[in-house]
Image (cartoon, rainbow, N blue to C red):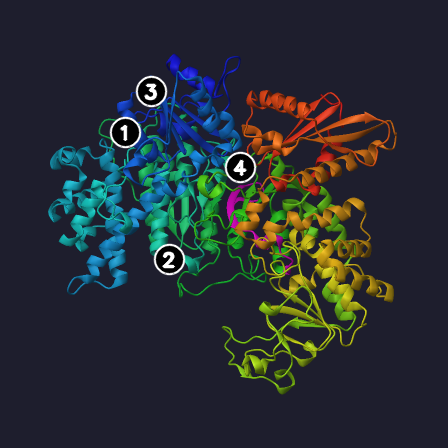
Amino acid sequence: MSDLLERVLSRTGFVDAGRGDMPGLRRHAVGNPHLEAAFSPRAGLQADAVYETDDGAKLIVKETGAGEAGEMHERAWNLGLAPLLWIVTPYEVRVYDAFRGVGTEEDRGPVATYRTDVKAEMAALDEFCGRFSLDTGTFWASDLAKGIHRAGKVDQVLLQEIQSLEQHLVEVSVAQPGGMGMAEARGACQELVTATLFASYVTDRGDIATPFDGSHRLGDVGLAELFRSRSSALALFDWLHETFNGDVFPQGMGESLRDEHLPLLEDFARGTSLRKRDAGQMRLFRFRFDTVPIELISAVYEAFARRAASDMARELGLHYTPVELVHMALDPVFEDLDGTARILDPTCGSGLFLVQSLRRLAWKCCGDGPRPRSVVRDILYRQVHGIDIQRAALRIAAFSLYLAALELETTADPGESIQFEPLIGRTLHEMDFLSAAARDLARGLGVDAVVGNPPWTHAAKGGDEGRTRKARAKDDDGGSGRSPDHRFLLAAVDVVGRGGRIAMYLKATPFMSRMWSARLFLERLLNGLDRVALINMSPLRMSGLFSEAKAPGLFLCANCGNLPPSDRILVGTFPWTDDFERSGALALSSADIAEAGKADVIANPSYLKASSLGTPRDIALIERFEHELVPLGSFLSEAGVVSGQGFQVKGEARDKPKAVPEAILDLPSVKPEDYAPLSLEGRPKPSLRQRGHLELLHARSRDLYRAPLVVFPKSAHRLALHPGRTSAALSGEDLAFSHGFYGFSFAEADPRLPAIVCALLNSAMPSYQFLLGAGPIGMERPNVLLQDLRALRIPRFVPTDALAEKAGRALASARYDGCEAVDALVADLYGLRGDERALVRDAVARGRSTLLGTALARLQDVEPPEGRQLVDYAAAACRTVNAVLRISGRQHLVAEVAPGSKLGDDRLDRFATVRFRTEPGRAPADVVSAMPDTEAGRLLHDLRHHLLRSPTPYLRERRSVRIYDGAQVTMVKPAQRRYWTVAAGLQDGDAILADHAPGRA
């Protein structure tokens, strides 16, 4: 590397004068086989450096002349590895968007240029995308990065192109006289797309196509020219069949090829966009299949094949797995795994997990040396196995594995044939993994690890494939009710045994459910595995985590890596970030994970969710509620309260609407649009007759509508007095309410109960329990179901006149005091201590994004904290520590909050800081103060020096750090509301105590 390049890397923090290369800067593929394509001469880029963090590569650096910048940009885009490319020329650094593949001519150029001999411009480069900005995520918040989006990556553009190609081919096939039916045309055209995609790869890898090239002058005319005549195209297809066998390319696959197809295939091969919005235009770059990683081609083809059969995919619950998630699952599996291990994907689809397993096994066997064809083929034929009920899926898997093997092979003996042996029937099996035969087969293979993303709905082989076979706990394999992917998991445990390695993506809600079948499943699973990690991914479900899938995901890892001992499990949650949709980067920090007792998780249905989303204090409080309190439904039923959901006008039920009973027809009625929190007095309440509802699908019992009533809307969090709370309203008159409400009739109960129950349902307590207690609220749906409401834990209290009057006064003031009196009343009712009260009340802010499930609420979570919030956070931390220090009375903890304005436009403006220190004597009433301006300036200077020189990128968006310096502790965390809550203050206070408090170096 040149001195110029070293100076650029040094000025931007990637190289330190004293330490050398910072962790994450890669100069070669040795020891980094996943970066092989970036450094390989074959891929054409031959990068000088790649910088990556533990959530993926961020930057490719290439030193070259200005005249080669365009080609290097094209190669970097085809690589699909990192969002940024630096082209370092003798005079400047050009920064390119390496994700953008479609756009205007201007988009071929750099997003910014920085002269290497201008100090201010080098500082600006460091500010925009130096090491600190990439480590912390401040890069994604910059103006220059706002146009960078993974939607433009090579795999996404390639997927859109082959979908458009297939669509045009099908249109031609069905439009011809005597043409095919749609289903037949789609199948035939998918074969043409497969052949064209494979041919594009092998022809760009010229050494593979040498036998064909010799007789067809492929190197002279190019692949596109072969599609100018039907005869040359058929010759190509025949060669593919002969060379790569019938697993993927059956004999006569080109029989459906028509002359009208040829221009479309030629356009694709030439690089002309076939998408409607870019029809007839060239993309920014052509596809360079000698650069595109094979796993991206496999992933693209899987998504293409599944979308092409979208109805079946939806019925089977198939979800395209992004390559990043495949890597995340396999990383722990392959940690310390023997190179002779056998891997099984029981629902292999296109073979994404198998492709990466093949690659990793080859690296384990060959290291950084040559990879002989014989070794790669031996691994392919013996060590990677897939099962699927769909023959078409196995053909895709074979296609993917063939491509992967070709890419991995670096040497071959003279005369060694390139032709593959068939995989289907040998390592790829057309079976149902839930069958006894399939599991016997898997056990006989001696499988060491089971990996994959099984379908969330299972169609039985041999019957109507549209008929869903739902798991029931009474089945032999103990499934979890409505999530058959968990049956695949239990089958995997059956195959590999208690100590076998497993890494799977599953539906999350059954793990957090109160349903007895789900509890039975979880108990069987945790007792059947030794070491386990369960990582909740539900916060990302609306951000394109699994393509179109909106159900919450969970990552399970068993017996892999550095997991806790068998009596504990690792739990955690991937937090939502405002850049995930653009970057696709996933990372867990120590702040996002915790350990939980396995026996506790089995015994308490709320324990896992509380451990995943809450703090240790939350876990203890929720556990106390579960053990000491009673369900609201049981309490009210014993008190003579009638409860249920309101009338339903129409729906998908088989029953036909019936005439409304006269006893209900003229009752006042309320729908969600008529609702107001606390009281329905004065609200418009036209009768069903006045609304024109003379027939109802479900009218419900007249007794349900008798006053006094408390009505609770299903969308309680959206109709609440304050976002994040739940809501309920009193009615002193008989009232018919729609199915958008659950109602409680107190006509036969103590008349003092309605006001108390209404106050409870408007307090922070329901949100706290819904956020952290068992159930799918906040994970899969924002709406509250009646069973959720009935399961709410409350103390068994005796209603009194004083309590009812206090509840009435609290409700009357709720609109003006922020529900403070309501929360105090309920906290007294539950017997909460001071910090427990703060913890519960804090749930309104903590749970807002989770419970509302809206983009706005998520964005509010990542907004900078206001000064008052930082003060409340600091006060909570001080209270925690001072509760211990006051025993001796010799010292106390105080806090200084750096004013937000002092963070300015510096790179550290993405972080907020609070400094704690000890002072002698007992704590005064006020222990939090604003930091003096001079102190704030010095603190920021010290922090900048500390963080910029840090050898570990521990302050990315999901990180926090405690810096101990003598008798003071400085807390540095992202300047986002969610990190500065009262609950966070209590937890950080506990952490300071656990670290032996101030004074620790």
Residue at mark 3 to residue at mark 1: CA–CA distance: 14 Å
Give the number of the mark in front: 4 or 1: 1
Q: Are marks 3 and 1 in contact (CB under 8 Å)?
A: no
Q: Residue at x 73, y 64 (%)?
A: 758
Q: Is residue 836 left or right of residue 863?
A: right
CA gap between label 2 and label 1 equals: 37 Å
Q: Residue at x 67, y 61 (%)?
A: 727
Q: Which residues are magenta?
A: 495-516
Q: Are marks 4 and 1 in contact (CB under 8 Å)?
A: no
Q: Can you tell which quarter of the image residue 296 is in?
A: top left
Residue type, mark 2 in image: Ser
Residue 337 visible, this angle = no
Say which element carries label 2: helix
Q: Earlier in the sequence, mark 3 or mark 1?
A: 1
Residue carrying label 3: 89
At label 1, which amino acid type do we have? Glu
Secondary structure found at label 1: helix
Quadrant of the rendering where the C terminus is positioned:
top right
Q: Earlier in the sequence, mark 4 or mark 1?
A: 1
Residue at image mark 4: 587
State the residue position of label 1.
71
Q: Which quadrant is the N terminus positioned in?
A: top left
Would you name the residue on which mark 2 appears? 310
Of mark 4 and mark 2, the one earlier in the sequence is 2
Q: Position of residue 152 (x, y in %)?
A: 36, 41
